[in-house]
Amino acid sequence: MTDHPHPPAPGWRQRLPLLLVLAVALTGAVLLRDHLNFEALRAHRETLLAWRDSHFALVALGFVAAYIAIVAFSLPGATAATLTGGFLFGLFPGAVFNVVGASIGAVLIFLAVRAGLGRGLAARIDASEGRVKQVAASIRENAFPVLLSIRMVPVVPFFVMNVLPALIGVRLGVFAATTFLGIIPGAVVYTWVGAGLGEVFARGETPNMGIIFEWHILGPLLGLAALALLPLVLRRLRLMGEARP
């Protein structure tokens, strides 16, 4: 008999949301990759603007719902959707719509992964010994500052940051809060780019999607990320000082 028995594997009901996400993601990758992009926005911009002017509330709700679906099912086009939010609704409320849609979509895929794999995997990690258990426990213990700082600097793919916390047992409330707060700076930058797409279209150019990695943008984002980690660093320094004889 072992001291840490493995938990039972999730049944098909628990795996169903994750299987649905995988099926839609694979289908979308094949069928939608040429339809949810910047060129599609350029081609349909007049129609979208006409819909917005005629039915603002309905278009706003439809946009947020579409953004939720794109993130929840890991469909192609998240960046184009963010630009569309800025193009249709301006920096405000476009940034609000983008953040809300992305956050809800991230929570949905987090829940699907946690139900299908995360709880069982997290329990197995906790029942194991070694480095993986220590790393997972350390991340969970300091989840808020760590996840918040990573979200603020868009280096780790968004999809990975939606899935990994579910696999190691991060609490839903912490995941949701760090996602919502952490993506605000990047969402504002890309929404701002989208808000200027009218002039970009008029010149026949494409938007500068690398702007977030230019130093005048990336520098403040790195500063915010470092600020999010400051409580963790100070706590570690205090513990080190207390441990000294």
Image (tube, rainbow, N blue to C red):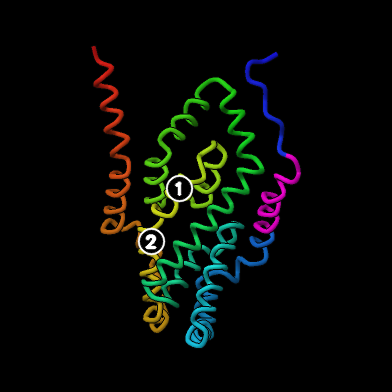
Q: Is residue 14 left or right of residue 96?
A: right
Q: Which label sits on residue 187?
A: none
Q: Amino acid at mark 2?
A: Gly
Q: Is residue 37 left or right of residue 236?
A: right
Q: Earlier in the sequence, mark 1 or mark 2?
A: 1
Q: Quadrant of the C terminus?
A: top left
Q: Mark 1 = which residue?
A: 156
Which residue is drawn at the image coordinates 53% and 69% (left, top)? 37
Residue farthest to the front? 173
Which residue is drawn at the image coordinates 43% and 50% (left, top)? 177
Q: Is residue 239 left or right of residue 107?
A: left
Q: Nearer the viewer, mark 1 or mark 2?
A: 1
Front residue (pair 210, 135): 135
The magenta stretch spans residue 2? no
Which range of residues does the magenta coloring cover? 11-26
Q: Mark 2 = which residue?
A: 210
The magenta stretch spans residue 19? yes
**SS for tag 2?**
helix
Is residue 234 depicted above or below 95 in this figure? above
**SS for tag 1?**
loop
**Prevailing SS of the magenta stretch:** helix
Q: Is residue 221 left or right of residue 166?
A: left
Which residue is drawn at the image coordinates 47% and 86% (left, top)? 53
Q: Position of residue 57 (x, y in %)?
A: 50, 79
The residue carrying pointer 1 sits among few (fewer than 14), some (14 to 19) or many (20 or more) residues within 10 Å by Cα, namely: few
Q: Amino acid at mark 1?
A: Val
Marks 1/2: CA–CA distance: 15 Å
The residue carrying pointer 2 sits among few (fewer than 14), some (14 to 19) or many (20 or more) residues within 10 Å by Cα, namely: few
Q: Position of residue 81 (x, y in %)?
A: 50, 68
Front residue (pair 240, 213): 240
Q: Quadrant of the N terminus?
A: top right
